[in-house]
Amino acid sequence: MERSTASDMASEKANPSYHSTGAVQMRIKSANSHHDRLSQSKSMILSDNVKVAEPVNRHRRNHSQHNLTLADIISTQDHTVVEKEGYLLKAKIADGGKKLRKNWSTSWIVLTARKMEFYKESKQPALANLKPGYKPECVDLRGARIEWTPEKSSRKNVFQITTLSGNEFLLQSDIDFLILDWFHAIKNAIDRLSKEQSCTSRNLEFKLKRSSSIELLNSLDAESKEPKPEHRKSLIFRLNYSASDTNDRNRVKSRLKKFISRRPSLKTLQEKGLIKDQIFGSHLHLVCEHENSTVPKFVRLCIEAVERRGLDVDGIYRVSGNLATIQKLRFVVNQEEKLNLDDSQWEDIHVVTGALKMFFRELPEPLFPYCFFEQFVEAIKIPDNAIRIKSIKNLVKKLPRPNYETMKILFEHLKKIAAKESVNLMSTQSLGIVFGPTLLRPEKETGNMAVHMLYQNQIVELMLSEYSKIFGSEED
């Protein structure tokens, strides 16, 4: 080994280019020996096109802790898949139901399956998660509501997200296709979460019913007579064999099937009042049939409450109420028959108006049925005002009875709101902006949503301005 070292030193002196060719000194030490051994050295002359092989680290802990990439670190911190991300203008206008001053700022927004995250403007937003102490603002989309709110800002393309906790955010972009893409992505995420929650509730209800059925069968077995002494040995003998276990299971299944088959149907339970129909989310004609009326009782109660104590309120129907309280009112309406909107818990009139708008927004088919949407749009395009009003009137007369009667009482109410414009600052145009997308919409959203919104607003505005001609009995 000494001779080898001496020869290496000699070659180094003889050849000045020795270092330029890339001499590599490798120290090799055996880890298996109980005693320290002398280290050995080797000299290798490597050509320029040959790369030095990196030592392979076989320690698992080293692999798991030290060989992670940036993507691995981010994925370990957040396992949710990013559905969409990009820059938008954002303004938070309410925090837990408390109104905030509107302040627009550019944010990098990350949308996942269950939430949205707002980051400060950065060239590398993904690295913000790695900074110690930095936490982005998160928005839980479960139970949230999204809607276009052009009345909330002088900017164009503004929509609002309202969470269950009472937080409200405005998002905006001057690029039409970009903001439409964001609106659809967020709306799809909210709708998907709503469906998942409904499925989870149904599965839980099924499991509860199933467990209660099994408990009932067990109680029936417990009430049965004790086996006679002469039969006890045979009973114990049977339980020791899998065949007898199978027979017992089959017997339980057969008895459970008989029990389920004897259960009353959903219709019978509804007729007896044990299960009540939902008001929110049901078809308008079904609600009216159940109540034996042409206008839902809840709609009448809301209109009466607003006309008693809300006609002079600034921004009535434009200002949003606390979403948590609105959801509470929604639950009460669906579960109880008696409703007193003069109760102190509903003292905020914006909660009542918010619940009324939610009722119309959650109709499976809007107040203006889908099959009439294009006809109303074509009618509002007519340049001659007299012909336009007559066409709208003829379409209104063709509506189903519940739709016509509900529409008539609602627009009569909104006309009273507009009459107090000098006090509440709600003109027919403002009411058209608020109720246009709520009362009529196409069955399938298309790329020309902005154009549809314009026509929706104009239709509601015209019907308010010409209420007596459209809903009156006189012929024009």
Image (tube, rainbow, N blue to C red):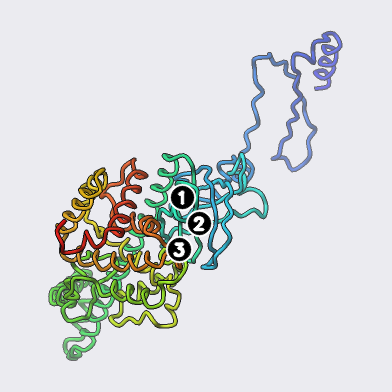
Closer-to-camera residue (44/261)? 261
The residue shown at (42%, 67%) is 316
Label number found at residue 158 = 1
Closer-to-camera residue (149/412)? 412
Of marks 2 and 1, the one in the foreground: 1
- CA distance for labels 2 and 1: 10 Å
In the picture, measured across the screen, residue 397 lies left or right of residue 305, that is left
Q: Amino acid at mark 3?
A: Leu
- x and y, in percent, of residue 454 in the image: 35, 47
**Image quadrant assignment for residue 280:** bottom left
- CA distance for labels 3 and 1: 20 Å
Label number found at residue 169 = 2
Could you tell me which secondary element the residue under label 1 belongs to? strand
Task: Name above or below for residue 313 compared with residue 431.
Answer: below
Q: Of callouts 3 and 2, which one flags the residue occurring earlier in the amino acid sequence?
A: 2
**Residue at image mark 3:** 425
Crowding at dot 1, Cα within 10 Å, few <14 / some 14-19 / many 20+, comes out as many
Q: Amino acid at mark 2?
A: Phe
Of marks 3 and 2, the one in the foreground: 3
Closer-to-camera residue (215/332)? 332
Q: Of callouts 2 and 1, which one flags the residue occurring earlier in the amino acid sequence?
A: 1
Can residue 10 be seen in this snapshot?
Answer: yes
Q: Quadrant of the C terminus?
A: bottom left
Crowding at dot 3, Cα within 10 Å, few <14 / some 14-19 / many 20+, comes out as some
In the picture, measured across the screen, residue 397 lies left or right of residue 17, that is left
Task: Name above or below for residue 218 compared with residue 67.
Answer: below
Task: Name above or below for residue 24 compared with residue 318.
Answer: above
